[in-house]
Image: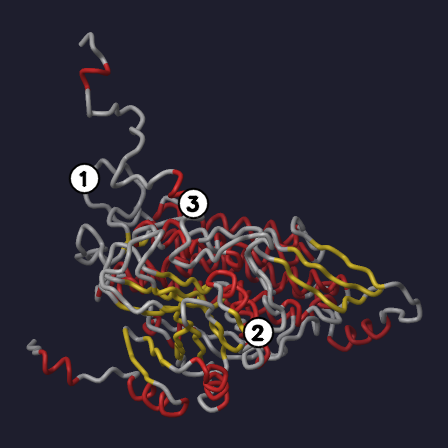
Amino acid sequence: MTSSPSDTEATVHPLQEFADSAAETVGGEAEVQFDTIKLRVSAERWVDVLTTARDDLDLVFFSWLSAIDWANEVEAGDPLKEEIEERIELLCTVGDLTEGRRVTFSTDLPTEKPSVASIVEVYVGANWHEREAAEMFGITFEGHPDPGPLYLPESFLGNPLKKSYPLLSREVKPWPGTVDVEAMPEKPSTENPSTENPEA
Amino acid sequence: MVTDSDLAKHLSEAQVSVELQTEDMTLNIGPQHPSTHGVLRLVARVSGERCFDVKPVIGYMHRGYEKLSEVRTYPQITALINRIDWVSGYANEIPFIVAAEKLMDVEVPERAQYIRIILTEMARVSSHLVFMASYPLELGAATPLFFALRDRERVLDLIESVTGGRFHPNFNRIGGVKPNAGSGPITKKTPQDLPAGFLGETRDAMSVVLDTCEEIEDLVAGNEIFRARTKGIGVMPPEVGAAFGVSGPNLRASGVKFDLRKVEDYLPYDQFDFDVVVGENGDCWDRWWVRLEEIRESAKIISQAVDGIPPSGPLQAKVPKVIKVPAGETYVRAENPKGEMGYYIVSDGGPGPYRLKIRSASFSNISMLSWILEGVLVPDIIAIMGSLDFVLGDVDR
């Protein structure tokens, strides 16, 4: 089997055609990555885009809505390898109920005071998903019929899924692996064997 | 056997009296109510026997898996996601592992694919058998529980014999399944595979499960009380279900012929012959019936997989010792027993994801509770809630 770079470039992903036509219908930029269509749109047109997706593209099934906090400084987990433009990326995946097509819509919001119009009027299932995204990322969904925390208690401070929010259990005790903080049972520390048993 | 016309007559005679005026009352159900399958709380406003407003309160079991995943490596995360929907722990692993394999461009050996299909469908059978046990129980029939749980135990024993775990197998590895599949001392260095006699026992177990389906159908379907309490109760139109993100058997019961096993390629289901079961009315009865039929379809898939599994071959593709997933984003979803389960992985090329979004089925399924429970009779709250078959671990994540 021969395969040269030009061959792979020439292969068009089977989803590309649908992705392009969807991008044309709603107005946005489509990208097919690992069998997932991601369609970037502007935040101002968020509700219009999803209304068009539901009515014209027949994507009637609401799958999920969530966000990604793109940050250079992280308190938990590994930082990104390259410096990026800090933003909150809002994602919403909707699909059809016939051929299994699905599109992940994406829009960028500012890290400080992110705010976007609610799509509960378009997909009623977005209600809980938006409440989750609101408490986890601090996004304001304007026009949400029932705002307020979903999972977290009323008194909870902060937005846990933001990268600036530390994982408290790791603050108290670092994760074993790089530093093994406690010796395993039945296996004494090998650091200083002579001090442990001076008689030997 | 009760006919539908008998039932209609019975229902018309059993109208609730509306003459008695009572004060509105707030009724708190849960978070420790047996019918909530965990810790769901409902705040229902009732007027007499009618409930006119229901507010589900969730979050009592929120474990923050999405945050925890950001500080764990890919192989460690499978241990977490087993515990999302614990009634079908094995099926939870599949979309996550497939998503990681997709990003890494790993081809899984055929034999491992077959083992995955057998175990996923077994997870579906065991999950639906729990529903077959618990749902009639919630409506007052205790006997089906014993029939269903007896055979579920048989299926769980088979899962345990391969993976070592009944509920949380943690059996998938990126690139295949655990290389020493099967019981036996792990110190023994000989390559192990499925336990001896597994395929034969699976075949037997599936014929037993099919017999049990007959028994349960005889026992439950003809029961006048069960029919009266489920037929025409909690009707969900397909367009409402779709807008709420209700998926899986709940949506199919409303007549939507859509099954991710038919349209997505996360496992080679296209090599198997099975039907997508759909209901007609989208009521509690249809949701019960669709699940019963799905057990039969899953048994069909398992039997075909047992017959068609390659007799030998590798269980794992070649992957590096330290798993690092190349940068990229993908969403992989699978048809889990409860509905669409998916993972959106954002990788930066490191040993763990930068962000992992978990799309769980029960979360969307019960988000429509306040819609479907509006205006129903108080006893129907339990009938409708039970018919949606949710697990709170899958709601709260």
| Chain label for disc 3 | A
**Disc 3 marks which amino acid?**
Leu
Mark in front: 3 vs 1: 3
Please report the residue visible at 60 percent of the width from the left and 49 percent of the height from the top: B146
- Numbered disc 2: secondary structure: loop
Please report the residue visible at 66 percent of the width from the left and 68 percent of the height from the top: B370
Task: Give the Cα separation between the discs numbered 3 and 1.
Answer: 41 Å
Name the foreground residue: B256 vs B73.
Answer: B73
The relative height of residue B358 versus residue A174 in the rendered view (above or below) is below
Q: Which residue is mark 2?
A: B253
Q: Are marks 3 and 1 in contact (CB under 8 Å)?
A: no
Task: Give the Cα separation between the discs numbered 1 and 2.
Answer: 49 Å
Task: Give the Cα separation between the discs numbered 3 and 2.
Answer: 44 Å
Q: Are marks 1 and 2 in contact (CB under 8 Å)?
A: no
Q: Which residue is mark 3?
A: A168
Residue extending farthest to the top is A199
Per the rendering, the mark at residue B189 is: 1
Q: Give coordinates of residue A45: x percent, y percent.
A: 45, 85
Q: Quadrant of the C terminus of chain A?
A: top left
Q: Earlier in the sequence, mark 1 or mark 2?
A: 1
Q: Do discs 3 and 2 belong to a common subunit?
A: no
- Numbered disc 1: secondary structure: loop
